Image (cartoon, rainbow, N blue to C red):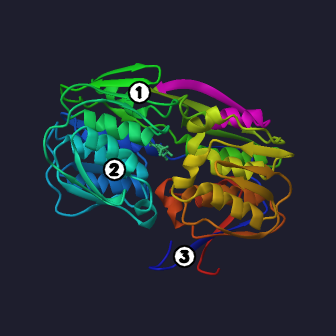
Amino acid sequence: MSGGGDTVNFLVRPSSVHNAECRVPGDKSISHRALMLSSLADGVTEVKGFLDSADCLATQSALAALGVTIESVGDMISISGLGARGFKTPDIPLDLGNSGTGLRLLTGLLCGQHVTAELTGDSSLRSRPMGRIIDPLVRMGASVKSNNGRAPLRVTACRELVGMTYVLPMASAQVKSAILLAGLGAKGSTTVIEPAPTRDHTERMLAAMGADIDVDGLSVTLHPGGTLQPVAMEIPGDLSSATFLIGAALLGNNVELVIRGVGVNPTRTGVLDILRQMGGNIELENSRLAGKEPVADIRVRSSQLLGIEVDPSLVPLAIDEFPMLFALAGCASGETVFSGLEELRVKESDRISAMADGLRALGVSVVESDDGARITGGSLTAGVVESRGDHRIAMSFAIVATRAAGPVRIRDVSNVATSFPGFAGLCRDLGVDIEETLNGG
Ligand code: S3P
């Protein structure tokens, strides 16, 4: 797509998706967990529907550097687990690229496995807060050094970790999972108590692999002991990726789009609740299970969206979908009020500010607050938007640009490949007038 140093942009012209059926790539959160947990399993795990995006491939390379053999054929991968305590000391720093999930979960896992390693990432990841995992891991007995609470992190094998009860200060599935993965190698039980429900893929996968794990409301307890057992895994389509296509269909010209085989775990479906409250016509069909994860086909019909006050209790259940929700609020009639979103400021970019600036560049009125924004929907003008190197900002503007009065250029979009390889091609197949251009083009 790009030569070294080139900036890739999207150029989107007014257009609409047409009536169609499609699929989206595998779930990013589940793909990361499949790699990490099967690396500890006692035997070979086959994973179907694995997301071969830059984020997951960075985790895959890190595990390879730790001695794990991973083979892939198409979207099928097989991971030869090393069992508990089988990792070798890596010869190189583990580079997790843009991936907070990769860095935070792997740090927790390595602390419990008595491995010495350095974990790092790109400039966005190196600017994100890591104190939230370092504090609990150190309380369990780990040695984790950082650059003032930021990556690079250095994990040093020292004494055996001891399980504990930890009350999470923020709703974060990454922090919860980092502690539970450390707990796999600790002496005694580890309990994590969340302030609100967050995605529970780690808990579901650990249970499927035979771990002794209890969930009681907002409290999760892992009792270590025994080796994880390999189980065949099928990874559903990523609802966070499907959200962009749902948005495109809602904004389309009287169209109906069916997205097949999408993960609809109730800790992820806040976006569907919010969009329905805004007037979105969205139905789930063929509900089924893939292993322990709920899956369905999603049928979306174009709808006139209305501004609402978004219930802050839905925030952790829709955490990655707010860029698209902000963009859709820009096209809704009336005002949409978002609050409780302070975590958005420490994602791949400051997503409140990135969305507010981008929407303003397209003529939408946005009043930003510390933890949210008030967006007055209306018509969008042509213009130029900065993605700030954030995949979800880039894709949200690519979709909403279909409703603008003229061409919209979205700058610096190559990180779309971290979560949704093939996004532009799929959008084009569905009818979106989208081009990938280089530099000023
Ligand atoms: C994720 C948890 C969320 C989410 C991220 C993926 C995970 O992060 O934003 O994209 O896979 O556990 P936080 O735990 O920081 O909220």
Q: Residue at x 49, y 39 (%)?
A: 170
Residue 112 percent location from the top left of the image: 21, 40
Disc 2 to disc 1, how far (Cα)? Answer: 21 Å
Q: Is residue 388 magenta?
A: no
Per the image, the residue denoted by label 2 is 73
Which tag, 3 or 1, sits closer to the chain's start?
Answer: 3
Q: Looking at the picture, which amino acid does disc 1 mark?
A: Gly
Does 120 sit above or below residue 335? below
Q: Which mark is residue 7?
A: 3
Per the image, the residue denoted by label 1 is 291
Disc 3 to disc 1, how far (Cα)? Answer: 40 Å
| Label 2 crowd (10 A; few <14 / some 14-19 / many >=20) | few
Disc 2 to disc 3, how far (Cα)? Answer: 30 Å
Task: Out of 394 and 429, give the one closest to the viewer.
Answer: 394
| Label 3 crowd (10 A; few <14 / some 14-19 / many >=20) | some
Residue 81 percent location from the top left of the image: 20, 40
Q: Looking at the picture, which amino acid does disc 2 mark?
A: Val
What residue range appears in magenta? 271-289
Assess mark 2: CB under 8 A from ligand 1?
no
Q: Residue at x 16, y 41 (%)?
A: 82
Total tally of numbered discs in the picture: 3
Does 197 sit above or below residue 60? above
Residue 113 percent location from the top left of the image: 18, 42
Q: Looking at the picture, which amino acid does disc 3 mark?
A: Thr
Residue 435 percent location from the top left of the image: 65, 68
Q: Residue at x 81, y 68 (%)?
A: 406
Q: Residue at x 82, y 64 (%)?
A: 363
